[in-house]
Structures are given as structure tokens and as C-alpha cells.
Amino acid sequence: EGFGLVSVASVDPTANAENLVKAFVDGNVTSADLSLSANATRVSDANAAVITIGVVGSAGADAHSNTTGNTQVYFGSASTVTASGNVTGSAVANNRSNAKATGGGGGVIGVGILESNANLTAGTTAYFNPNAQVLQAGNVELSAVAVNTAKADTTAGTGGVVSVRGSQATARV
């Protein structure tokens, strides 16, 4: 927040969440049941709030949120599985990226320029590599489930004899 004859304020928060989660077999396995599971939750939140008041009040904000990562379950090329029961693999991911910018400027001249960007790049996979072998199993089941959410909110307000404002919100998945 800023107050004065000429008041200028700018904020630029950035939030990042990134990781790799994997479960895999890449060798000989003999078992009753074989279950592989990879679970991931990635969350990034960037929030900016700025207010200026003066004869000239100018406010700027640029919030960036980035969520990146892969969740994998796989059977490698060198894997040989013999199971008297079931063979299962499950990859589950919950990925979220949120960016929010709010604010504005007020005075005889009021300016408010705000932007928010939420980016989400994530993969969720379950697979058999070439040459992977299941020699014996009751049932074989692979699943990959992901919930990916990117949200960007921007609100700009200004007041004055001369009033300039602009806002942009971008969400990418």
C-alpha cells in the first residue's frame, strides 16, 4: 500500500511447485500380487495485492504461478514379472496452479495495471516399456488419472480525473 503526493507501488510474486514421482519395476519379480502406485499433489499459489493513493496514484502487479511435474508408473524394458495373483499399476496426480492480482490507484491521476499468469505443465502416465514381460498373472491393470487445474484472476480499479487501468489474466494447462 502506498500514500503520498506521488504514490507508486509494484509487486511481482512468483510461486513454483515442481517434482517427479514414479514407481517402477526394472528387473525380475516373482510374487503373489504386485501393485505399483505413484501419487502426487502439486500446488502453487501466487497472490498480489497493491493499492496506491496520491495526487498521482500508480499501482502495478504481476503474479506468476507455475506447477510442473510428472507422475509415472511403469514396467521397464528389463522387467520380467511372474505373479500368482494380480499385477496393477496406478498413477494419480492432483495438480493446481493459481495466480491472483488485485489492486489499483487513485488520485487526480489514477493508474492500475495488473496481470496474473497461472501455468501448469504435468504428465501422468502408466505403461509397459518395449520388451517388458508379464509371464504369469491373474489380471493386469494399469491406470493413470490426473486432475489439472489452472486459475488466473485479475481485478484492477482506478479513480481520478484521469483514470487508466488494465488487467490481464492467463491460465495455461
Image (cartoon, helix red, strand yellow):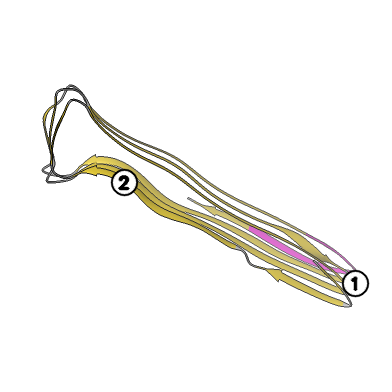
Q: Position of residue 136 (x, y in %)?
A: 11, 27
For label 2, count other residues whose C-alpha is less than 10 Å away and answer few (under 14), some (14-19) or many (20+). some
Residue 85, above or below 71: above
Residue 56, above or below 46: below
Residue 114, above or below 44: below
Q: Residue furthest front?
A: 31
Q: Look at mark 1 in the image and give the residue it sits on.
A: 108
Q: Is residue 2 left or right of residue 66?
A: right
User: Which element is circle 2 on?
Assistant: strand
Magenta range:
157-168
The image quarter containing residue 134 is top left
At label 1, which amino acid type do we have?
Answer: Val
User: Which element is circle 1 on?
Assistant: loop
- Closer to the N terminus: mark 1 or mark 2? 2
Of residue 171 and residue 24, the one placed in the foreground of this image is 24
Mark sitting on residue 168: none
Q: Is residue 51 left or right of residue 133?
A: right
Q: Is residue 131 left or right of residue 18?
A: left
Residue at image location 15% in from the left, 25% down from the top: 137
Q: Is residue 164 left or right of residue 90?
A: right
Q: Look at mark 2 in the image and give the residue it sits on.
A: 22
Q: Is residue 158 magenta?
A: yes
Residue at image location 90% in from the left, 72% down from the top: 108
At label 2, which amino acid type do we have?
Answer: Lys
Alpha carbon distance from label 1 to label 2: 57 Å
Residue 79, above or below 55: above
Picture quarter with the N terminus: bottom right
Q: Position of residue 101 (x, y in %)?
A: 68, 58
